[in-house]
Image (tube, rainbow, N blue to C red):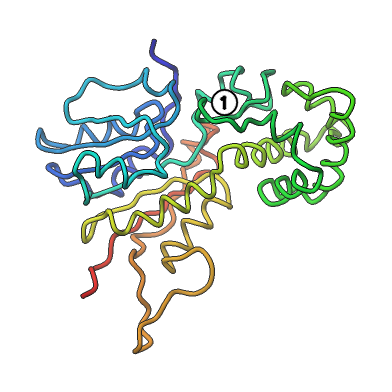
Amino acid sequence: MEMSYHNPVLLKETVDGLAIQPDGIYVDVTYGGGGHSKEILSRLSDKGKLFAFDQDPDALANVVDDPRLILIPENFRYISRFLRFYKVTKVDGILADFGVSSHQFDEASRGFSTRTEGVLDMRMNQRSELSAREVVNNYSEEDLASVLYQYGDLKNSRHIARVIVNSRSSQPIDTTEELKKVLKPFLKGFRDQKFLAQLYQAIRIEVNGELQVIKEFLLQVPDLLTEGGRLSVLSYHSLEDRLVKRFIQNGKFEGEAEKDVFGRVSVPLKKVGKLIVPSEKEIAENNRARSAKLRIAARNKYEN
């Protein structure tokens, strides 16, 4: 059964960023509903090839019947390993959309949404052992506070963690509604949705190891891209975007870019164009687009 997914954000701009060569080899590391992949396929010749990754079994229901497409049901942190399995060591472009899919938000049983009741799950890969319930019920107060502060930017993270730990000592917190009830002291009306969104984001990032996955993925990109090959990346919050921006600028996530013995900066990627954000019209048509940021980069010339 085909799953319902919303339209991809910045579809044309993201695929345009790949500067597609009809006979090239491309990778969509976040297949989801297949929107970006279908657009890439529409620009490829019969000789072109597209590899797509998605660890969510629901995405498999959206696979298009096209001999040029190979969908790999794995996390994109393993991109190099699985491309090698298909005897592919270089590609002409890589696309990544780091957002949680609309389908995952809309499916109450997955526990991603702040608006619908569901079990505390939030796993993008249903085979993973760590779930939101595990984080909320078993993390120490200190570790829980750290997650909420680092990934949700919640200034009162220690107080929130203390309230959660005190509540779970008498009864486990199993559903999103039960978590909301525990958090009632922090819900005061005007900023409730923002507060819940930040808290859910923090737990989701922890459950799925999202920032570590992005780091591992980006570190593999330069070696995979052909000279001039493109990277096109959509991010949806500052933690993701900061990693992408720094890696494109410096080839690393912390500190300054490395220099050679002559003091020349040496980075594997170069920025292409300016930061792209959705138009007001697109945001009006798709609220999910409001926080999206698109960055495009190309592989620099290989060093001798």
Q: How many marks?
A: 1
The kind of residue on which mark 1 rests is Phe
Q: Is residue 212 left or right of residue 274?
A: right
At 61% from the left and 18% from the top, the residue drawn is 108
Label 1 sits on residue: 105
In percent of width and height, residue 279 lies at 46, 43
In percent of width and height, residue 182 lies at 85, 28
- Secondary structure state at the residue bearing disc 1: helix
At 56% from the left and 38% from the top, the residue drawn is 208
At 40% from the left and 57% from the top, the residue drawn is 219
The C terminus sits in image quarter: bottom left
Q: Is residue 29 above or below residue 231?
A: above
Q: Is residue 254 left or right of residue 35?
A: right
Q: Is residue 258 above or below residue 10?
A: below
At 23% from the left and 68% from the top, the residue drawn is 301
Residue 188 picture quarter? top right
The N terminus sits in image quarter: top left
In percent of width and height, residue 4 lies at 44, 18
Of 114 and 212, nearer the camera is: 212
**Residue placed farthest to the bottom in the image?**
262
Q: Is residue 183 left or right of residue 61?
A: right
Mark 1 burial class by Cα count in 10 Å: few <14, some 14-19, many 20+: some
In percent of width and height, residue 169 lies at 88, 29
Of 126 and 61, nearer the camera is: 126
Residue 8 picture quarter? top left
Q: Is residue 174 above or below residue 26?
A: above
